[in-house]
Image (cartoon, rainbow, N blue to C red):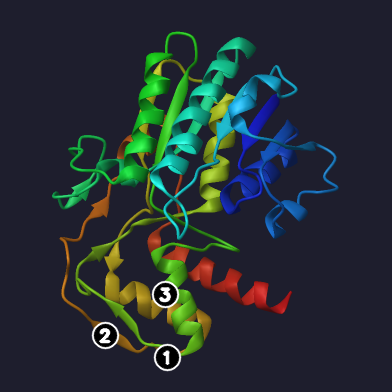
């Protein structure tokens, strides 16, 4: 199968491209910049790397049987709303229209839990109300809606992601906790005795994307994904510290908002998602951090 993967210079996109190639798919990976993640893909025979902007998706060397759209611009210093609209909405629209022209059979979209905005329920699933999403969440939701409008000709699944961990993970809660623990700095957190499972491992997501392409899909759907089971926030920090071989210094702070957990029931039962249990996921992540330090 010929598969287009966007965002291969990023953490998740690179992992998806590598796994699909290992399964015998012919992968074209689109990127905008050079990164260490991208350099690890060079030399893999099944992966063709193309540098370009998704606004010109129609010029990519298609047709492609499937698209896995990982690329996104998220909030960061120097990133304004205009950039997120361009990269997360306009570029997604161009990619969708190109996929329709290629007669692609599957479109997997890496969306975000940010689409929900202010969460007011204890367990988030697909029925959770959308309330005041920030600009990033709004742009990801618009991407989902663009796919919904073309569901008659382009089958798709939007995956609403929490923080994604694995070797090289960054810019999410668990990865920031790992940095602080490794530096011997205190970890400030709230709702320490509340339940937690708000993470996904990048390998679970890559396998999920691969099996979605193999099984095919119809229409358009959106699913929430997270880890199996749950532990307390305090236990998550302590378990990560134990895996890293350090002693944690945990400081509780006032909760700015209610805590919540994630329900992956729909993703598991309808779509075959098979995530790690949260404790095992944290153990694996700690081992991956230590292995990276040795390499």
Distance (Cα) linking label 2 and label 1: 13 Å
Whether tag 3 and tag 2 are in contact, CB under 8 A, the answer is: no
Whether tag 1 and tag 3 are in contact, CB under 8 A, the answer is: no
Q: Nearer the viewer, mark 1 or mark 3?
A: 3
Upstream in the sequence, badge 3 or badge 2? 3
The residue carrying mark 3 is: 177
Q: Residues within 10 Å of mark 3 (few under 14, many from 20)?
A: many
Upstream in the sequence, badge 1 or badge 3? 3
Residue 77, given in percent of the width and then of the height, sits at: 45, 60
Residue 126, given in percent of the width and then of the height, sits at: 26, 36
Distance (Cα) linking label 3 and label 2: 12 Å
Distance (Cα) linking label 1 and label 3: 13 Å
Q: Quadrant of residue 81?
A: top left
Q: Quadrant of residue 102?
A: top right
Quarter of the image with the N terminus is top right
Regarding residue 40, the answer to whether it shows in the image is no
Which residue sits at x=76%, y=49%? 41
Query: In the image shown, does 136 or 85 lie closer to the viewer?
Result: 85
Q: Which mark is residue 247?
A: 1
Image height check: is 33 above or below 288? Answer: above
Which residue sits at x=36%, y=53%? 228
The residue carrying mark 2 is: 251
Residue 241, given in percent of the width and then of the height, sits at: 44, 82
Whether tag 2 and tag 1 are in contact, CB under 8 A, the answer is: no
Which residue sits at x=35%, y=24%? 145
Residue 97, given in percent of the width and then of the height, sits at: 54, 16
Quarter of the image with the C terminus is bottom right
Q: Residues within 10 Å of mark 2 (few under 14, many from 20)?
A: few
- Left or right of 28, for residue 140: left
Q: Quadrant of residue 194?
A: bottom left
Regarding residue 100, the answer to whether it shows in the image is yes
């Amino acid at each position: 199968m010929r598969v287009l993967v966007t965002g291969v210079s990023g953490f998740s996109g690179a992992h998806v491209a590598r796994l699909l190639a290992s399964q015998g798919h012919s992968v074209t990976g689109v990127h905008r910049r050079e990164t260490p993640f991208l350099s690890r893909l060079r030399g893999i025979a099944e992966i063709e790397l193309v540098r370009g902007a998704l606004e010109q998706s129609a010029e990519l060397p298609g047709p492609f049987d499937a698209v896995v759209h990982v690329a996104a611009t998220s909030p960061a210093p120097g990133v304004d709303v205009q950039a997120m609209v361009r990269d997360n909405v306009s570029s997604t629209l161009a990619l969708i229209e190109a996929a329709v022209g290629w007669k692609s059979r599957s479109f997997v979209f890496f969306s975000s839990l940010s689409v929900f905005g202010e969460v007011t329920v204890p367990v988030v699933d697909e029925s959770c109300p959308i309330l005041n999403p920030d600009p990033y969440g709004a742009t990801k939701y618009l991407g989902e809606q663009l796919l919904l409008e073309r569901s008659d000709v382009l089958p798709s699944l939007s995956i609403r992601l929490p923080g994604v961990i694995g070797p090289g993970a960054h810019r999410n809660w668990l990865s920031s906790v790992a940095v602080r623990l490794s530096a011997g700095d205190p970890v400030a957190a709230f709702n320490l005795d509340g339940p937690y499972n708000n993470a996904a491992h990048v390998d679970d997501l890559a396998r999920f994307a691969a099996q979605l392409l193999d099984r095919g899909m119809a229409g358009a759907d959106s699913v929430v994904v997270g880890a199996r089971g749950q532990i307390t926030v305090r236990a998550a920090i302590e378990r990560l510290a134990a895996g890293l071989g350090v002693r944690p210094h945990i400081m509780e702070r006032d909760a700015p908002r209610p805590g919540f957990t994630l329900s992956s029931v729909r993703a598991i039962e309808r779509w075959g998602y098979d995530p790690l249990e949260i404790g095992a996921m944290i153990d694996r992540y700690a081992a991956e951090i230590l292995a990276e330090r040795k390499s």
